[in-house]
Image (cartoon, coloured by chain):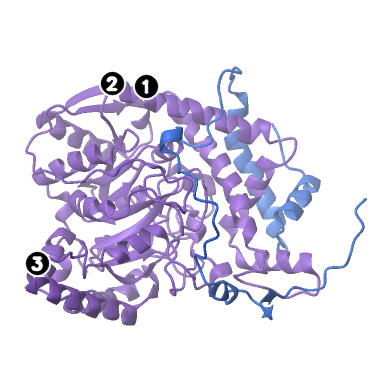
Chain colours: A purple, B blue
Amino acid sequence: MGNVCTLSAVELCQALRKGEVSSRALTRAYLERIDALEPKLQAFLTLTPDLALQQADLADQVLFEWRKDTARLLPPLTGLPIVIKDLLCQRGVRTTCGSRILENFIPPYSATAVQRLLDAGVVTLGKTNTDEFAMGSSTENSAYQITRNPWNLTRVPGGSSGGSAAAVASAMAPLALGTDTGGSVRQPAAFCGVTGLKPTYGRVPRYGLIAYGSSLDSVGVLARSAADAAMLFQHMAGYDPLDASAMDVPVPRYSLQDKRDMRGLRIGVPEQYFITGIQHEVEQAVRNAITAMQGLGAEVVEISLPHTKYALPVYYLIAPAEASANLARYDGVRFGLRVDDPNMTALTRKSRGAGFGPEVKRRIMLGTYALSAGYYDAYYGQAQKVRTLIKQDFEKAFEQVDVIAAPVTPSTAFKIGEHNEDPLAMYLEDVFTLPANLAGVPGLAFPVGFDGEGLPIGMQLMGRHFDEQTLLQAAHTYQLFTDWHTRRPEF
Amino acid sequence: MNQIDPQTFAHLVELAALELKAGEGDYLRKELNHQLQAIDELTAIPLDDSVEIAAHGVPYPLEHSAPLRKDEPQTLIDPTTILEQAPETEERYLVVPDIPHTTLE
């Protein structure tokens, strides 16, 4: 075979089953590519080559036995390498959340999403860089390193799942797990020219996902195509008795058809997502993609999501409020960093002061303020009410249309350091992705073009609760006719 | 518009259990006030009492909510592996500095 690292995940699964490539050879190929590219990209916080090769050898044994008797049950992803955002626990593998406070944390259990994929036979190559506790849109807030965008090393890969997006875009892995609290799968997917799925809230269990904003966090997928994303997502979704927020809704078979048209699909285009200030090339590329879908038979409908403008302030109250509660567990006593002091209270304060970075402290403080006596109703309570209005916007829209099409970000990937002095400018990067998290609806980002500087442009489709299938099928059909998702950065 | 004064800020730092480095507090307070300007518009939105709060984006009807587990003890993780993550233990207890007894008023 040629360069196996450039094959799609679907093709790799087929090649592994046919014995055209062994899992060991495939894993070694990816590890060698990581060795070559990682010094430039800095996408990984922890690499696990020994574990990966052990898993690969076991997978090869399983595949060998299966080929002798194909009537045997074969775990569906046997031998396929993936990478995991360092916000998800993997038993025995260091999990830092990009934070000094968890620098030496070795989880004693695996996240349900990770365990399900291990049970499905995957090989895990390592843990990818993230903004500290997923708080950021550029991966610059990692306490360890800044990941570079494979399309232009002076640009950010987006965040917080920037390590995962950069790894997939540069073919250091065929698939990656990410998490999306306010856009952290879709925005890096758009910046790196890959496909990123944020499922419906409650579709993939959060057990073992280290919590940031508990009413918003979703475990998602970064892939090279909608077909690859669907394949991984299939084996992560579904009810989990260990997570009360995982919904007991049947998981369909996400079988994408090579449909050559989009007849019957109604696409809503919300005016509030095409605002002044959006990069012209981004708007043009997204509108061109919508026109292309219309040309394939989809019906395009102008819609309104009138409360979109409030999504940013609502998110930046609710998420920090939930974060301030969730991060209270880092006390220097049970796990994580401890800075010793003979006074117990001082020990906790010193440990947290030394272990958390500036953005995390900023959000803890804002959340503490929003939840404190005298301000709770005015801020947190009010934000929860406005969240209802944002949800109702989506409910009304989905009475008219099947999916909503919009840009993922107002611009393409920005320069490293560009927003360092202005956190609010950084927050504005999420303006188009936050509403889906607040409404709990699924969102799928995929590439629809490039700007004049050769940077990828992403579009997102948002859908009804638990209707990931429609999003994946629409993107798959679009990808049958276009080649944006097949283009690769050169090194 | 609400502004966080130094006294309120000091109280928040205590609630958040953070020790801040010299200069970090002033910077954070300035940032917080800057952010409050941006989110203050929320407080001005007129909402009648019929608007309910949304704790989640997804509704949780009973038929889709997680069923209750049987009230039986389960060991998911060996407690020893959990204790291995603690900075300091002694005979399976977490070790912390002496906490002086206080009398609640």
Q: Relative to A418, is A411 above or below?
A: above
> Measured from the top left, where is residue B59 in percent x and y?
45, 33
Please give the residue where the numbered disc 1 appears in the rendered image: A396
Which is closer to the viewer, label 3 or label 1?
3
Q: Position of residue B30 (x, y in %)?
A: 67, 48
Which residue does the image show at 60% across and 74% down from the upper left?
A: B83
The amino acid type, in three-letter code, at marker 2 is Gln
Mark before the other along the chain sequence, 3 or 1? 3
* Label 2 environment density (alpha carbons within 10 Å; few <14, some 14–19, many ≥20): some
Where on the picture, by quarter, is residue A385?
A: top right
Residue highlighted by disc 2:
A400
* Residue at 78% in and 52% down: B10
Q: State the residue in front, B43 or A411.
A: B43
Q: Quadrant where the N terminus of chain A lies?
A: bottom left
Q: Real-space Cα distance between discs 3 and 2?
A: 47 Å
Verify CB contact (< 8 Å) between mark 2 and mark 1. Answer: yes
**From the viewer's perspective, is residue A142 above or below residue B55?**
below
